[in-house]
Amino acid sequence: MTTTRKAQGGAVQRANYTTVFGSLADHQKGGVELIADDARHYAFSNIFDVASKAIAWDRVAVAKNWEYVLETIRAEGTSPWYAAAHDEFAICMDDGDAEVLVELVKPDSPVAPEGSEGAVLLHTEPVGRPMGRIHLKRGHQALLPKGAAYRFVKQGAAGVLLIQTIGGALTQYRWADICQTV
Amino acid sequence: MTIQIDNVHQSEEANADGYREFALGEFTFKRDEFFVYIGWPTGEHMMSADSFLRALQRDVAWDFFYGIVNFDGVFGTLNHYGTVDIFAGRFNESYRKAELDYSENMETPRIRATFEAILDDWTNESFDPFASPHETGSAFGLKNGSNTAAVTRQRVAADRMVGVPGDEQVRSDDSGYPVNRMFADVDQSEPVIEVEPGFEDEVAAFSLFAYLSRSNVTWNPSVVSVCKDSLACPTTEEYILPIIHGNDRVEWFVQLSDQITWEVEDRDTGAVRARVTMRAGDVSAMPADIRHQGYSPKRSMLLVWENNSEKIPEAIASGKAPTYPIEF
């Protein structure tokens, strides 16, 4: 135990605190306790719960605010190549006790049409200059820069990514399956 | 006697407890050892000084934020993004029925200057309104110094992403951001980045969790990544959100660690609608017609996700857009 300074009230605190993060293997879902409302108005879900039931690299929306979305991805194996005409961001929420690798390539010619929204799937390996690689562990956030081609590599146990992007052709909406409804 | 300095109307002399008194339109503001007294033409209201200063700190730091900042069930502000309504009883059904509610609209710089002056004058050196109760001293008592450095902290707002060259940078001991006592177990390693020459500005990453573990404020969302109008605004939370936030648009919460419980009420009447318990990994929308207050038993990490588009409040207020995020 520790005690705050007398000037701060002299309260007794724990000597150590445990920060609780979630993972595919270990997560506890909360919920909406309704008093006078509809649960669907909150679109309540859990990204680990969603990823646990997803096919690898499916981009499942867990939040949507007009055109913008947050997508959950089950990271397992090697993803296809993607690109977008705007910046996207990836947060590694679960690294499965190993890294999630991000590979970035600058295509010789644009692969995501200017003005398009959301990630675009590349059906072949991008032709261009390697930009670099990012090794993500839990809690790390990467820029997926506008105009770059990128893919993820996750060896070993599956991990979970949260993507900040715009809804596009690859975004899957499964609200009735993933959200609390009553 | 009231004097005007830099568009702020304040008493020339401090009162018997050492605090200046302020006027903003028809509203008046006074404090003593324990309480703040807010007056308007149809009424008067009392708040505990610590609660008032914690709420005022967020209102100032957020520049009146999105929608409504209720200091409590009576007093608050409503942002029109260029002007601000300052109100009493406007979102309280009893005050409205009794016709005791009152509000005034004023230019944002005017209310900002007055609120900043009140915050600076009424915050003693022993008190940090941004800190959790375990990390600060008392707000009470006679006027005793000031804490200008604490109440004028700059809100972090990345243009693209924290860690990108030329943008907001990661936090460290050297930059004055030690790891918070409740996040001492959070991994501080930064991502390994291999950059090919010429792409130094494009290949970027940082540890969001380490960054948040070093936050020295509570309940203060800061922008870490931007996709057009999509703003990722994570924050660290401990104890109680000092305001009751009334939405003018849908916002989303992603609980990154630990747990927060949200009490959700009707935005206009205060009637209870739901209680939302969020644990690590949980995602929940906050509809555009509610107000909410969070309770965090341990310091936790919360991703607040906002759509900054200026078209949304009018679209929702006019009924052209729904108050909830998804039809399903």
Image: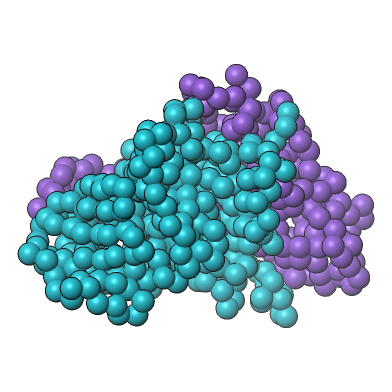
Chain colours: A purple, B cyan
Residue furthest to the left in view is: B16
Residue furthest to the top in view is: A182
Left or right of A132, for residue B183: left
Is there any visible trace of residue B71 in the rendered image? Answer: yes
Give the vertical position of A31 relative to B211 (above or below).
Answer: above
The residue shown at (48%, 27%) is B274
Quadrant of image for the C terminus of chain B: top right
* Residue B37, x across and y down, in percent: 22, 53
The residue shown at (48%, 38%) is B268
- Front one among B276 and B25: B25
The residue shown at (82%, 45%) is A170
- Front one among B134 and A126: B134
Left or right of B118, for residue A77: right
Is there any visible trace of residue B131 in the rendered image? Answer: no
The image quarter containing residue B30 is bottom left
Give the vertical position of B48 relative to A108 (above or below).
Answer: above
Q: How many labels does the image show?
A: 0
- Front one among B139 and B88: B88
* Residue B210, x across and y down, in percent: 45, 57
* Residue B1, x across and y down, in percent: 18, 73
The image quarter containing residue A143 is bottom right
The residue shown at (23%, 42%) is A14
